[in-house]
Every structure is written in C-alpha cells, then in structure tokens.
Image (cartoon, helix red, strand yellow):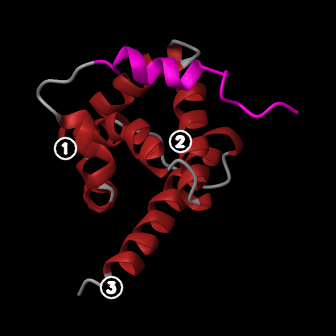
Amino acid sequence: MRSRLPRVSTVARYVLGLIFFVFGLNGFLHFIPQPPPEGAAATFMGGLAATGYFFPLLKGTEVVAGALLLSNRLVPLALTVLAPIVVNIVAFHVALAPAALPMAILVLVLEIGLAWAYRDVFAPILRSQAAPASAPARARLTDRSHAPVA
C-alpha cells in the first residue's frame, strides 16, 4: 500500500490541477458551454458578476493554482489557496445547484486526499501555540559575515 501512495497522490494532483486549470481558463475563454444558472444560483452568480472583479480574480487564481499542481511546484501553497475555493464550490452546490454536486464532492475528496498526502508540510501551521523564529536564527539568515567573498 505504501508504494501506491506516491502514485495515487500524483494522479490526484494531476486531476485536481487539470480541473482547476481547465475550468479557470474556461472562465476567460468560454470554450466549455455551460447552461445559465437558475433561481437562487442565478441571483448569487449575478451578484458576484456585478462586482466586476470577483470572477477574474477567482478564475485567475484557479489557473495559477492548477498550473502549480500540474507542474509539481509549490503544491502545499496551491492546496492552501484552493482550500477556501473548494469549500465554496461544495457549499454552492449543496445549497444552490445540487445537480453538479458529484463533481464538487470529487474536487473535495481530491483536495482532502492531497492535504493528507502533504500532511507533514501542514503540521507546523496546525500547532495550537507557536512562537516566532528566535532572534539568533533570524540573525543567521541575514548575517553575511560568513559568506564567501567573491
């Protein structure tokens, strides 16, 4: 089982990255036709669209985070940025548009699975109490007295 985990997380990373990259690009290029929302979902989406900034910001974030996942760069950062987006996708489909709920659940499962796969990276930010870096450690980072002279 342990030997499968890296392969499963790689596949999950590619699938989640592809979902966000493609649907993020679709927000700009409109190459996947989508039926207009109805009822409360239409009202909600109309309010977000009326701001003028929300959808470009959201879709741009999705494209960048999706590209990071696909390129295997800054994966924990991409997962962190996508987490509130995933929560809102699931909440939207639970409350306003249940027809696409299976896709939202898939995205949630992929996000949680990848967060679990990268749990060692996330462990330090989940401490109940944390202290800032000590002064000597910060001094070492900025001290250039031991740097080689060119």
Packing grade of label 3 (10 A; few <14, some 14-19, many >=20) is few
Q: Is residue 49 left or right of residue 135?
A: right
Residue 79 or 26: which is nearer the viewer? Answer: 79
Q: Which residue is mark 1?
A: 94
Residue 83 or 7: which is nearer the viewer? Answer: 7
N-term-proximal mark, 3 vs 2: 3
Tell me the amino acid under the disc marked 1. Val
Q: Which residue is mark 3?
A: 4
Residue shown at 25%/38% (left/top)? 124
The magenta segment is 132-150
Residue 100 screen position, x and y as percent: 32, 55
Tell me the amino acid under the disc marked 2. Glu
Q: Which residue is mark 2?
A: 62
* Discs 3, 2 touching: Cβ within 8 Å: no
Looking at the figure, which quarter contains the N terminus? bottom left
Residue shown at 42%/24% (left/top)? 137
Q: Secondary structure at mark 3?
A: loop
Q: Is residue 90 visible?
A: no
N-term-proximal mark, 3 vs 1: 3
